[in-house]
Amino acid sequence: MNDTEVDRIAGIVAGLRHGFERGVTRPEAWRREMLRRLRALLMERGAEFEAALYQDLGKSGAEAQLTEIGFLIAEIDHALARLHGWMRPRRVGVPLAVQPASARVVPEPLGVALIIAPWNYPLMLALSPAIGAIAAGNAVVVKPSELAPATSHLIASTVPDALDRRAVAVVEGGVPQTTALLEQRFDHIFYTGNGRVGRIVARAAAEHLTPTTLELGGKSPVYVDDSVDLPQVAMRIAWGKFMNAGQTCVAPDYVLGSPRVLRALGPLLAEAIHHLYGSAPDRNPDYGRIVNDAQFERLVGYLSDGEVLVGGGHDAAARFIEPTVLRGVARDAAVMRDEIFGPILPLVEVSDLDDALAFVTARDKPLAAYVFSDSAEARDRWERETSSGALGFGVPVLHLVAPELPFGGVGESGSGAYHGERSFRVFSHEKAVLSKPLAPDTLGATIMPPFTPQKEALVRRWLRRLL
Ligand code: NAD
């Protein structure tokens, strides 16, 4: 147990606030130095991070590099290359009625940020928002997930030492620690996890009028029609679904298709899974494990919600569940109500595109939706008629790698978005700065009382044309 003592938490946050108020975090040089040090830590101790991720999730080294360590390094490089431009005040125009004057938008740090991370990408989701917070000049406290204890501890024992303890802290623990953190006043809370806790975070934040970013989950649908190359589609769906053993917030949750498409897709998914993980995924080091016994039991419970078409094997001692495809799943089965968040992929029959769109729009807005169709009309209708955090044509998951694309949810899948410059903006206040000379006086003769008939005429008739 490495939990932070609850009664130390107020002091930790006060220390960070002191650091922020002394101006430690504001200089561009400090921000750059922190990002460089974090980069160096990830490079130099990459093997330890890989080992921790393997311990928590059976994550392979290659997957750990691809989706966590390398992802963070790329994000740091992106920020370092652009930070100067992001920080630069932006000159904007003013309407004629305000002239002469000059106006600028000046990004300033918010203060002390709290980042609460989940267990499924326990390194990336703890540090990726922190990169934005630091780049924007904030002090930051990171609370990694207690359900990925090896990674949580490695973050806690390396990051504050490598960076700057005056402005960067890590609190380890679960509900008691997070509850104590949420009693403190922060300037932004960035939470990634499930919607139940998202509501707890939002309520606590409201108490201090603290803005939040809520990165939540949901059931991300896939739609496939018969206009596309189904073997390639099966590979892409299987890749997106079974990476990290299905424990990915933007993983394809289920597949919608006509009976004919699903009949053809089933065996192709079996081939794709075999291609990716071989005939014995339990012995394949590229295939992950379920994070804990409770999640394992929950997932195994779904196996009886349909007919097992592929996989279905599982081993409680190893928390292993084979990549599994279910068919004949009732629309109201438990596996179709909850976010699956594991390696089980239901195939759900729809009669046509209308039926698929109606199915998705009747449910919570998902974090992502994926469409495999060459029909311009189908693609267009998905884009116009459904709402989701992201929409992928032809590929799942990959949108999160493009730093110019906002990454976030809508409705039940969250609010706010980050990545790239947006991560900097999330943790910045855009201050409006207007500067008007005292002379010539353009206000007394126009908009200030006493309102003479001439001034009133001006206000009534043409001032709005000058605005
Ligand atoms: P989790 O159980 O690790 O919880 C997330 C965080 O909330 C942890 O740090 C935990 O300590 C804290 N927490 C738990 N209970 C709390 C309470 N009562 N009060 C205060 N804090 C509490 O992770 P999880 O929620 O199981 O994560 C999985 C969910 O996260 C899925 O729904 C998934 O889709 C979603 N997710 C979303 C994204 C995204 O970027 N949008 C990314 C990953 C996961």
Image (cartoon, grey):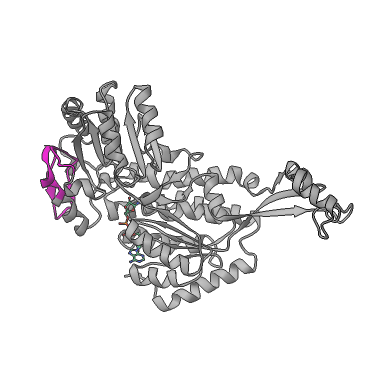
Compared to residue 76, the image places residue 373 above or below, namely above
Please state if 244 lies on the left or on the right of 318 as rendered.
right
As drawn, which residue projects farthest toward the bottom?
7
Q: Which residues are magenta?
A: 302-331
Residue sitting at 47 percent across and 38 percent down? 402
- Residue at (37, 61) in percent of width and height: 199
**Taking 326 as reference, is 177 left or right?**
right
Q: Is residue 172 left or right of residue 208?
A: left
Quadrant that contains the N terminus: bottom left
Query: Is residue 401 placed above or below 380 in the rendered structure?
Result: below
Position of 178 relative to 215 (above/below): below
Residue 37 appears in the picture as rendered: no
Camera sees residue 114: yes
The x and y percentages for residue 57 are 28, 52
Q: Is residue 32 left or right of residue 386?
A: right
Q: Quadrant of the C terminus?
A: top right
Location of residue 311 in the rendering, given as x and y in whole percent from the top left corner: 14, 39
Q: Nearer the viewer, residue 234 or 331?
A: 331
Quadrant where ligand 1 appears: bottom left
For the residue pair 57 and 95, the one nearer the viewer reads as 95
Judging depth in this view, the residue of 176 and 305 nearest the camera is 305
**Residue 59 drawn at (x, y percent):** 29, 48
Residue farthest toward the right in the current orientation of the protein: 440
Percent coordinates x, y for residue 72 in the rendering: 46, 47
Q: Is residue 323 magenta?
A: yes
| 329 in magenta | yes
